[in-house]
Image (spheres, helix red, strand yellow):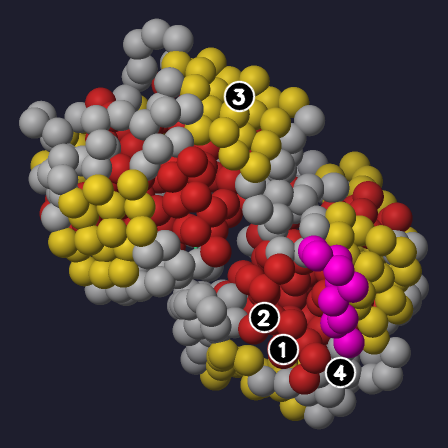
């Protein structure tokens, strides 16, 4: 096990390049199941993308991953099963369900368990795939799904615009017979990226990025050849780092206007974010931050995946910030850890009230989930003395070389072997 040791108080300075998006890569990697061959570039080298690749290899696909380029080839028989051991480490493994059903007419996928940030059921995924004619049973902790005569296009209205549910259904609809209309679809940029990768391979999709997506199914699609979009949450996390630690950095491969809600809120808090060119922005904070309220919402609202990092920055702002989490019911686990650094935060239901303090002071803290870990890095960069963050394996699920990138920006951050069993 490893930990991060951060000596806070250094303003950041320099240039950083954003990696490919984790949340766009995962569905596109699983979309390879729909084709004979996929070549996917700009795939970040992370625990989650490695888990996705292991899943495909376990199913019998041949996969080669090097220098952020992934090639997946179907060589022989495919085992249409996603095993518990791999699914339990990554919920997004459930995204194998739609493509397996569409391509092979059957799938056996372990039911993902709960996770630290909330119950996160997959009922909406299953309901949607049933509308396309899949017969689904939950048995012994597995989702057993069959579509003996293939999937048939239908109109599907989601009760809630679920990101994963929309992706699963979109991939299934591509090889279903006839037309599928997805209403109340999620509009996240990662869904647009998935749709683009499928369209490039010959799929017939319209309306991605809006709440109604139309798909006309085909018997087969061609090879996927695609470069994944940059990671908007990683980009937002670097803005949060500058907001907390101060300084001025240039971000390259900035994911365009997909981060508008986050940029607006950081500007309101006193951070300057200026566009320098295509995909290049400068981020600067010299004065003190101002307390700023946020409410997490589905895209294009403020993303829940940036809530923890924004809160960490607001711990040092002047005045009060009211932070409301509406997407997940248990996503304030970072609060107890931020309090250990001296933050003044009170929670009432889904609302956290942050009263800015003059300084945070380093301590030992524990990462509890992916974005919570990132918030501890943000706070650690601004805290006086040394902060040690344990269980950084959560962070490594979703950030490529975060310690190295921050070191290059002048932060004093080291990854060390943990002396503890965690
Ligand atoms: C994806 C992202 C995650 C992000 C989230 C919301 C990936 C790999 N993960 O997760 O980083 O935080 O979107 O932007 O892309 N729900 C149900 N039933 C379902 C599906 C969802 O009740 O069948 C609920 C969830 O419990 C949650 C909410 O809907 O409260 C949003 O979930 P969803 O949009 O599906 O998120 P994920 O796809 O799991």
**What percent of the width, then of the height, locates residue 47?**
58, 35
Residue that carries the numbered disc 3 in the rendered image: 71
> Which one is nearer the viewer's eye here, 322 or 242?
242
Q: Which residue appears farthest toward the bottom when viewing the image?
A: 319
> Residue 123 lies in magenta, yes or no?
no
- The percent coordinates of residue 49 (x first, y second) are 54, 34
**N-terminal label among 3 and 2:** 3
Secondary structure of the residue carrying numbered label 3: strand
Q: Which residue is mark 2?
A: 260
Q: Secondary structure at mark 2?
A: helix
For the residues labelled 3 and 2, the Cα–Cα distance comes to 33 Å
Figure quadrant of residue 141:
top left
The residue range painted magenta reads 272-281
Q: Nearer the viewer, mark 2 or mark 4?
A: 2
In the image, residue 14 sits, relative to residue 239, either above or below, namely above
Question: Regarding mark 1 in the picture, which secondary structure is present there?
Answer: helix
Tags 2 and 1 in contact by the CB under 8 Å rule?
yes
Sequence-wise first label, 3 or 4: 3
Mark drawn on residue 264: 1
Q: Is residue 134 above or below residue 357?
A: above
How many residues crowd around disc 3 within 10 Å: few (fewer than 14), some, or many (20 or more)? some
Disc 2 to disc 1, C-alpha distance: 6 Å
Res 270 label: 4
Seen at 56% across and 73% down, the residue is 261
The structure residue drawn at horizontal position 48% and vertical position 56%, both measured from the top left corner, is 189
């Amino acid at each position: 096990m490893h930990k991060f040791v951060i000596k806070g108080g250094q303003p950041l300075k320099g240039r950083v390049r954003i990696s490919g998006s984790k949340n766009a890569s995962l569905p596109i990697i699983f979309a390879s199941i729909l084709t004979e061959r996929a070549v996917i570039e700009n795939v970040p080298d992370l625990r989650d993308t490695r888990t996705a690749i292991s899943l495909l290899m376990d199913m019998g696909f041949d996969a080669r991953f090097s220098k952020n380029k992934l090639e997946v080839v179907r060589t022989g028989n495919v085992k249409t099963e996603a095993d518990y051991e791999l699914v339990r480490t990554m919920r997004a493994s459930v995204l194998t369900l739609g493509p397996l059903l569409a391509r092979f007419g059957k799938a056996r996928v372990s039911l993902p368990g709960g996770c630290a940030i909330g119950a996160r059921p997959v009922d909406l995924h299953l309901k949607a795939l049933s509308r396309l004619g899949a017969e689904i049973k939950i048995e012994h902790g597995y989702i057993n799904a069959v579509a003996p005569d293939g999937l048939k296009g239908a109109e599907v209205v989601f009760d809630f615009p679920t990101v994963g549910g929309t992706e699963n259904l979109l991939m299934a609809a591509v090889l279903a017979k006839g037309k599928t209309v997805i209403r109340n679809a999620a509009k996240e940029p990662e869904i647009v990226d998935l749709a683009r990768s499928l369209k490039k391979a010959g799929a017939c999709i319209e309306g991605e990025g809006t709440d109604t997506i139309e798909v006309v199914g085909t018997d087969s699609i061609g090879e996927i050849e695609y470069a994944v979009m940059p990671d908007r949450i990683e980009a937002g996390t670097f803005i949060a780092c500058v907001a907390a630690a101060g300084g001025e950095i240039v971000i390259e491969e900035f994911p365009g206007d997909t981060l508008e809600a986050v940029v607006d809120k950081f500007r309101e808090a006193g951070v300057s974010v200026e566009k320098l060119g295509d995909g290049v922005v400068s981020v600067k904070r010299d004065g003190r931050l101002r307390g700023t309220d946020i409410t997490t919402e589905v895209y294009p609202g403020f993303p829940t995946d940036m809530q923890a990092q924004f809160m960490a920055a607001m711990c040092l702002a002047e005045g009060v910030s009211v932070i409301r989490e509406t997407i997940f019911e248990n996503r304030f686990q970072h609060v107890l850890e931020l309090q250990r650094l001296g933050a003044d935060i009170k929670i009432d239901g889904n609302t956290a009230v942050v009263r800015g303090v003059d300084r945070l002071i380093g301590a030992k803290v524990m990462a509890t989930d992916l974005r919570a870990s990132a918030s501890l890095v943000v706070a650690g960069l601004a805290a006086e003395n040394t902060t040690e963050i344990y269980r950084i394996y959560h962070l490594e699920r979703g950030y490529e070389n975060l310690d190295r990138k921050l070191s290059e920006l002048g932060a004093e951050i080291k990854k060390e072997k943990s002396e503890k069993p965690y």
